[in-house]
Image: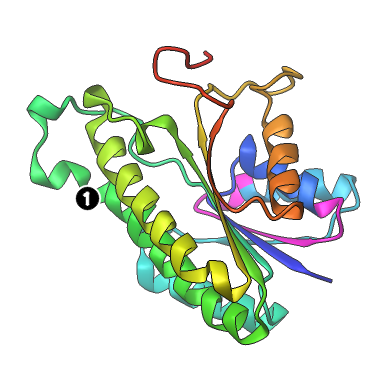
Amino acid sequence: MKTMVIVGAGKLLGLSMAKEFGKQGFHIVMIARNEQHLQQLQQILINQKISSSIYSVDICNLDKLANTFKNINKSYGKIDILAFSPNFGHINSTNVLDLKPNDIDSAISGNLKAAIQSVNAVLSKMLSYNSGALLFTTGLSSIYPNSNMSESTLAKSALRNYILMLDKSLIDQNIFVGHISLGIFLKENSHDVSDPDTIAQRWYEKYKNNEHGEELYPLGVTPETIIK
């Protein structure tokens, strides 16, 4: 059975990704800080007969995150898909004119540093098998700067550049690198483009069809047309 690890698994997109890829035969490994919430997500997967496991860790603690991946690798061997989509930097956002150097620490740790640590934990085996996939989901601020969300904009744009470099470096080595930048507010059970299930379906389609690289979701969305 192939294994997918979801870093920053939550009740919206993380759960939808778990359900979509789980029903396609993947064992789902979910990583997040709150163990109680993880247990609730896992119960939903159990009810849908999806194989899963959970690991509770603060992804900003890079040493603990690295150790978590060691345990996952030991338990499951090769990780076939890494999905990275934690939500850091959106709460109590600071206008750029009020930004202090230390204000960006959490957003940088939870976005860029955690992404690098996660990729480093899985990439060597992917390269040795000449297969694997890295899936990144961000918000629109990764592409369009938002001065009222300065921490998130700085962290997500740095993450975006890391993703672009990964894609350029790995495209000839059969490692899929995909990035979807969301221009919507997630709405559970909306049954439209804002539904996390719809986005998860798009992710599986993108992965299955090897549509590597970056895309805006919905196609062509801008800060002026973001769907709330």
Q: From the viewer's perspective, is 227 left or right of 146? A: right
Say if the magenta span includes residue 203.
no
Relative depth, front residue between 178 and 150:
178
Q: Percent from the top left, x then y, of residue 76?
A: 71, 78
Tell me which residue sits at (67%, 34%) in the image.
199
Q: Residues within 10 Å of mark 1 (few under 14, many from 20)?
A: some
220 above or below 177?
above
How far across and down, in percent of the image, does residue 11 sit? 64, 37
Q: Give the range drawn in magenta.
A: 22-37
Q: Residue at x 61, y 78 (%)?
A: 126
Could you tell me residue 67's position as x and y percent? 48, 77
Residue linked to disc 1: 105
Residue 97 image-quadrant placement: top left
Give the residue type at disc 1. Answer: Asp
Q: How many marks?
A: 1
Q: Quadrant of residue 175?
A: bottom right
Q: Which of 190 and 198 is in front in this view?
A: 198
Q: Nearer the viewer, residue 139 or 33?
A: 139
Residue 54 lies in quadrant? bottom right
